[in-house]
Amino acid sequence: MSKKPKLGIIQSRGIGDIIIALPIARHYADQGYDIHWPICQEFMGNFQNHAPWVKWIPLPTDSRGDFFYKEPMTRLTNLGCDEIICLYQALSSHPELSQVPWFQIQHFDEFKYTKAEVPFIEKWNLNQCVTRSLNTEISLKNKLVKPNTNYYVTHFEGSDFNADPDLTHLPPEWQRIDIRAGVTASVFDWLTIIEGAEALICIDSCIACMVDQLKLPIENKYWIPRSHIHLTPVLGSQWTVLAAPDHSSAAQKIFGAR
């Protein structure tokens, strides 16, 4: 019996980028590839049990930045991968990554799908990529949400960004549930809480990517921009887009807009 071909993916961080790229990996897994994917070791808890069909490889996050490209390439080459796809839109150490015709005309998530030769619409097939842990999700909800209470969910802290929007338009009797790092092992553990919320207000982040790509049926979703257009993902569902914070690059005006 012939062995499956091996596909290596270079996208070691961040959590949102990995979520965006999971349907790319699923596309190739469905074609018969074994998927080998090095990611920063602190992200392993988010994915190893929720996408066990991927052979995740933990990488130390080093100050030299080798975890972005050099170390993943070394690991994947040593594994004998038949193909290796680097999904980064740009790296200062590898300027050739951005020297492609579609760099200036696509959002960074579109770029990844074009690079991988996967139809962009497959980005919203995340539900085919993820195994949920309902017991963990329900346990977290029972721990954080008061019984028989309306509530809303916020996520305002990213890896290098935070926001503090005005929430006075929300009913004061609603309980506020804040998604914060370290509360649970995986971002996917928040799904049951999010699904039961009256509203979700979040920055452009891994949570927003997860909710949008899973097409969760939440009626009131509010999205806070953080970056300029080239670093902002395409949204596939209806969100109310709030004003960008002044300290974000999304607040910059382009094309002479006022």
Image (cartoon, rainbow, N blue to C red):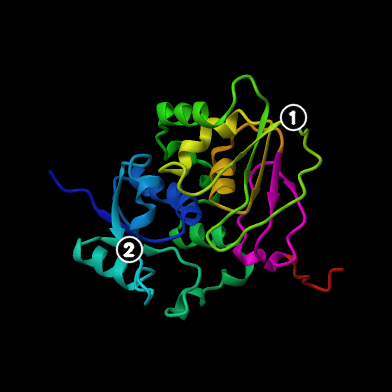
**Which stretch did the figure color magenta?**
221-250
- Observer-nearest residue: 179 or 98? 179
Query: Is any part of residue 205 visible from this angle?
Result: yes
Left or right: residue 258 compared with residue 90 = right
Residue ID at (63%, 67%)? 105
Look at label 1 and name its amino acid: Glu
Disc 1/disc 2 C-alpha distance (Å): 52 Å
Q: Residues within 10 Å of mark 2 (few under 14, many from 20)?
A: many
Q: Nearer the viewer, mark 1 or mark 2?
A: 1
- Residue 212 lies, in percent from the top left, at 59, 43
- Residue 246 lies, in percent from the top left, at 75, 65
Relative to 76, residue 127 above or below: above
Q: Mark number for residue 84? A: 2
Name the quarter where the N terminus is drawn.
top left
- Residue 194 lies, in percent from the top left, at 58, 34
- Residue 145 lies, in percent from the top left, at 57, 29
Q: Mark number for residue 212? A: none
Relative to 164, residue 1 above or below: above
**Residue 247 part of the magenta segment:** yes
Q: Mark number for residue 173? A: 1
Residue ID at (64%, 43%)? 154
Q: Residues within 10 Å of mark 1 (few under 14, many from 20)?
A: few
Query: Is any part of residue 121 visible from this angle?
Result: no
Left or right: residue 142 compared with residue 26 = right
Kindly state the secondary structure of the residue where label 1 is placed.
loop
- Observer-nearest residue: 6 or 221? 221
Look at label 2 and name its amino acid: Ile
Q: Which residue is most to the right?
A: 258
Secondary structure character of the magenta stretch overall: loop
- Observer-nearest residue: 73 or 106? 73
Tell me the quarter of the picture where residue 72 sits: bottom left
Tell me the quarter of the picture where residue 258 sits: bottom right
